[in-house]
Image (cartoon, grey):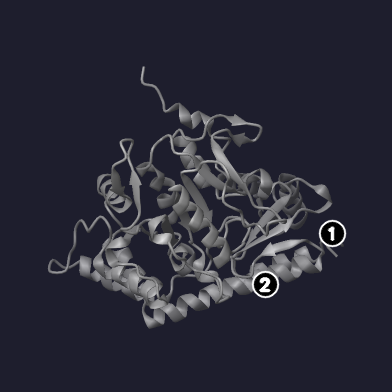
Amino acid sequence: MTRINENYLNLQGSYLFAEVVRRAAAYRASGPKREVISLGIGDVSRPLAPAVVEALKKACDEMGRAETFRGYGPYEGYEFLRRAIAQHDYRARGVDIQDDEIFVSDGAKSDTACFAEVFSQQAVVAVQDPVYPVYVDSNVMAGRSGGFIGGKFSKIVYLPCTEKNGFSPLPPQERVDLAYLCSPNNPTGAVMTRQALQRWVDWANEHEAVILYDSAYEAFIREKELPRSIFEISGAKTCAVEFRSFSKTAGFTGTRCAYCVVPKDLTVKDAQGAVHHVRDLWLRRQSTKFNGVSYIVQRGAEAVFSPDGQKQTREAIDGYLNNAQVILRALRGAGFCVYGGENSPYVWLKTPNAMTSWEFFDFMLDKLQIVGTPGSGFGQCGEGFFRLTAFNTPDLTRQAAERIMQFPFKGECL
């Protein structure tokens, strides 16, 4: 009889956001008195920018003519998009990233889940706690996690992100090979400073570790002193990979396009001590398991970097950040302890009256008809917290804020 990969049996319950959707759907089916407003899953509500739509239409027309039709594209992405990414997101900001260090993909979720494939199955993994679940679950599937004991996986190193450390972890004391960092952070909304990132880069280079840096929300950073890329930090090109996405930046959650940056200077060793370039390993992985993002979508992504595309996508991001401010004001007015929402689309709040995260989820859904995400679903340090997103429409966000202001628990942080 064929046997399964038993690492899958170590996965805990259903995927967090699938469970949120399931519970919200069950509540809707029960017939609530008013509309349920979702501030839970981080999906966008604004349409694609007109410049992107125009580029998609033009590319569709090209694919319908024999003289401009294209079949399989380059595994690492078309040169026109990689050049635009490297120039706009890096070189224009004084960061020396070359076109051939860019790899276009169908999502940062896919990249962060799959990138660890190029490293040893025995690699020791560190994650922030609370953490985006994909980092943990993908390593559970790969067999790096160990058993689930006392609410944690025994072989994963957890980096507490708490109120005391401003939700910004310090490098671990124990041996770690791969460290996942996310800034602006999902779920806490915290943004790592240059000083904090420099500590991490120095640690990684000293210990020959690799940082897997998820900066999918960098476009939401408005404070100029905060880094938008780990490659702004001295020494990062020898120890880090960066993941970015068009999903939240340009509304591509359903269109699917992202990229990662793998510097040529990043190397690792095999069991015999021979040195290998991670970029070459990732290209080999992609060319074996991935046929690339469609030409049409990549032309749409290229349009994000046009003058009109930049103006239109920035307006959309500003709209989401305004939503975050509406949520923050309502929560603070109701007496909640709140974090994030300033350079991030995520608001992280402390649950009132010692309620657990799932108890608060049920309360918000039953009493206010608002869907959020329980902090405990992101890890042990997320218990007692709750995540709200700013990705709904301005009108529904305002309605949710009005409901929050009617919240019966007052003075939690006043």
What's the residue at 28%, 42% (across, down)? 274
What's the residue at 54%, 59% (across, down)? 199
Instruction: Check the image and report above or below for 364 versus 313.
Output: above
Q: Is residue 318 left or right of residue 254?
A: right
User: How packed is label 2: few (under 14 Cα within 10 Å), some, or many (20 or more)?
Assistant: some
Instruction: Check the image and report above or below for 159 versus 321.
Output: above
- The disc placed on residue 38 is none
Considering depth in this image, is 385 or 408 the residue closer to the camera? 385
Give x and y (percent) for residue 174: 56, 41
- The disc placed on residue 412 is 1
Q: How many marks?
A: 2
User: How packed is label 1: few (under 14 Cα within 10 Å), some, or many (20 or more)?
Assistant: some
Tell me the quadrant of the picture where the C terminus can be found.
Answer: bottom right
Disc 1 secondary structure class:
loop
The mark that comes first in sequence, 2 or 1, is 2
Tell me the quadrant of the picture where the N terminus can be found.
Answer: top left
Which amino acid is tagged 2? Answer: Gln
Disc 2 secondary structure class:
helix
Give x and y (percent) for residue 212: 45, 53
Q: Is residue 138 left or right of residue 91?
A: right
Which residue of the protein is positioned furthest toward the front in this rendering?
Answer: 206
How far apart are the two marked residues, 2 and 1, measured between alpha carbons?
19 Å
Give x and y (percent) for residue 352: 81, 54
Which amino acid is tagged 1? Answer: Glu
- Can I make out residue 304 in this image? no
Q: Is residue 135 left or right of residue 299?
A: right
Q: Which residue is mark 2?
A: 325
C-beta proximity under 8 Å, tags 2 and 1: no
What's the residue at 66%, 32% (across, down)? 150
